[in-house]
Image (spheres, grey):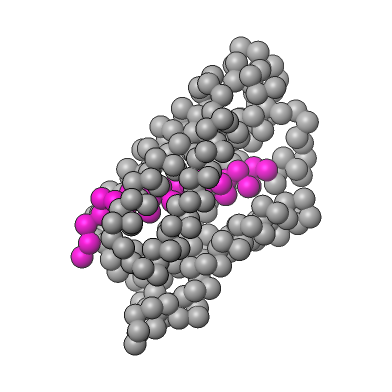
């Protein structure tokens, strides 16, 4: 099935509008989430509310800060595991909540990096993400064999980042950022190929297809954010 989809001449002509609509919806969800996160992040930092996430005496996170920084992880698991049980409306609400909470946590970058550096990292991320997304969608090479390896790398980066949160090693932070750029760019291509397979699958219809488009947007959004953070940490100049 995958080989048939990757071989563009064998795709039925009447399937292309359906696939185009699906991919368009995926990116609509992704861009909508990025907009929500960007606006929330900027407003939270500009209003000074970012400081409410920290214990000003110790410099560490307070209870609200831990909820904002780690709560999104729980929301992602809830959405992924509850796709079949949760309604589309609930999934959409959780996606919006995730985008807002991530914007609150990302507001801290405005306290660490210069605005020009943040903008540069964002545009670099957009360029790299765009190239890999096009590559993943158009290539005829089966990328699924690399997916499992890259997702294991994703989990390893997440665990290492949690550990480094407590030990604060600058060397480990540099290594995590380097690996992050490689893993997240690679996963972008893998994920786009997976979404292409879904887009051309005629058995996925109705509400299921709608939910898959939303979760596809969530996955691309997460990859974009993580790639942005990796590039910002790797090349960003600090105030």
Direction bottom: furthest residue? 57
Residue 117 placement, left or right of 60 = left
Residue positioned 42% across, 59% down in the render: 161
Up the image or down, 218 lies above or below 1; here it is: below
Which quarter of the figure is the N terminus placed in? top right
Residue 192 picture location, percent across and down: 54, 34
Can residue 3 be seen in the rendering of this structure?
yes
Total labels: the figure holds 0
Is residue 22 inside the magenta stretch?
no
Q: Quadrant of the C terminus?
A: bottom left
**In the rendering, at what x and y percent does residue 205 appear?**
77, 36
What secondary structure predominates along the stretch shown in magenta?
helix
Whether residue 88 is situated above or below residue 140 in the rendered picture: below
Image side of residue 8 versus residue 166, left or right: right
Quadrant position of residue 45: bottom left
Q: Is residue 9 left or right of residue 181?
A: right
Instruction: Identify which residue, 161 or 232, lies in the foreground.
Output: 161
- Residue 73's spot in the image, x, y percent? 56, 61
Regarding residue 110, the answer to whether it shows in the image is no
Query: Residue 142 lies in what quarter of the image?
Result: top right
Q: Is residue 227 magenta?
A: yes
Which residues are drawn in magenta? 212-239
Residue at screen point 48% across, 62% down: 102
Pinpoint residue 169: horizontal percent, then vertical percent. Answer: 31, 63
Please give the name of the residue rendered at 60% of the width and 57% of the height, measured from the top-left corner: 76
């Amino acid at each position: 099935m995958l080989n048939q989809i990757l071989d563009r001449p064998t795709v039925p002509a009447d399937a292309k509008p359906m696939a185009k609509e699906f991919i368009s919806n995926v990116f609509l969800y992704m861009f909508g989430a990025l907009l929500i996160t960007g606006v929330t992040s900027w407003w939270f930092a500009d209003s000074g509310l970012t400081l409410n996430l920290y214990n000003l005496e110790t410099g560490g996170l307070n209870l609200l800060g831990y909820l904002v920084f780690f709560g999104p992880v729980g929301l992602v698991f809830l959405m992924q595991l509850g796709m079949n049980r949760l309604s589309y409306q609930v999934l959409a609400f959780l996606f919006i909540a995730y985008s807002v909470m991530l914007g609150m946590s990302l507001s801290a970058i405005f306290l660490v990096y210069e605005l020009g550096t943040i903008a540069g990292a964002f545009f670099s991320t957009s360029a790299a993400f765009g190239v890999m997304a096009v590559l993943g969608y158009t290539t005829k090479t089966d990328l699924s064999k690399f997916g499992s390896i890259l997702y294991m790398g994703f989990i390893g980066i997440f665990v290492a980042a949690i550990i480094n949160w407590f030990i604060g090693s600058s060397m480990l932070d540099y290594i995590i950022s380097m690996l992050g750029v490689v893993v997240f760019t690679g996963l972008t291509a893998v994920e786009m190929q997976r979404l292409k397979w879904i887009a051309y699958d005629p058995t996925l219809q109705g509400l299921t297809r709608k939910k898959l488009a939303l979760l596809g947007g969530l996955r691309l959004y997460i990859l974009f954010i993580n790639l942005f953070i990796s590039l910002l940490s790797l090349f960003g100049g600090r105030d």
